[in-house]
Image (cartoon, rainbow, N blue to C red):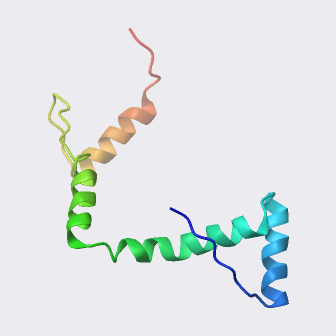
Amino acid sequence: MTHILTLELNDQIFTAIQRQAEAIGVPPERLAATLLEQRFGQDLKLLLPEAEQETARAKFERHFGTLNLEHPTALDNESIDADLVREYASTHEEG
């Protein structure tokens, strides 16, 4: 759902919006709407009811998982450095 909102801007703000809109090839009202959405969109997400927040969190967490590399890996700095040296030295030629 969208709504029409009439704003009264001073000349300085309107000119800045108009110039930026012309530079990127959009109407000034579209740029102003986009700027407002960017500014307040994130704040409004924080105001969602608890049930909607939980639904959003569940959707996000569906992307969590595990990765099986089928071989052991070490995560210490020395092992990582050794892996990097091996990769940098490799010509990646088969055979």
Task: Identify the residue at horizontal 19%, vertical 43% (top origin).
Answer: 65
Task: Identify the residue at horizontal 21%, vertical 55% (top origin).
Answer: 58
Task: Identify the residue at horizontal 25%, vertical 66% (top origin).
Answer: 53
**Quarter of the rendering occupied by the C terminus:** top left
Q: Nearer the viewer, residue 6 or 76?
A: 6
- Asked if residue 65 lies left or right of residue 93, the reply is left
Find residue 86 and report its horizontal and vertical position in percent.
Answer: 36, 34
Find residue 52 and report its horizontal and vertical position in percent.
Answer: 26, 64
Corner quadrant of residue 48: bottom left
Above or below, 67 relative to 44: above
Find residue 22 and report its horizontal and vertical position in percent.
Answer: 85, 64
Find residue 85 and report its horizontal and vertical position in percent.
Answer: 38, 39
- Asked if residue 21 lies left or right of residue 3, the reply is right
Above or below, 87 relative to 74: above
Above or below, 55 relative to 10: above
Q: Nearer the viewer, residue 80 or 56?
A: 56
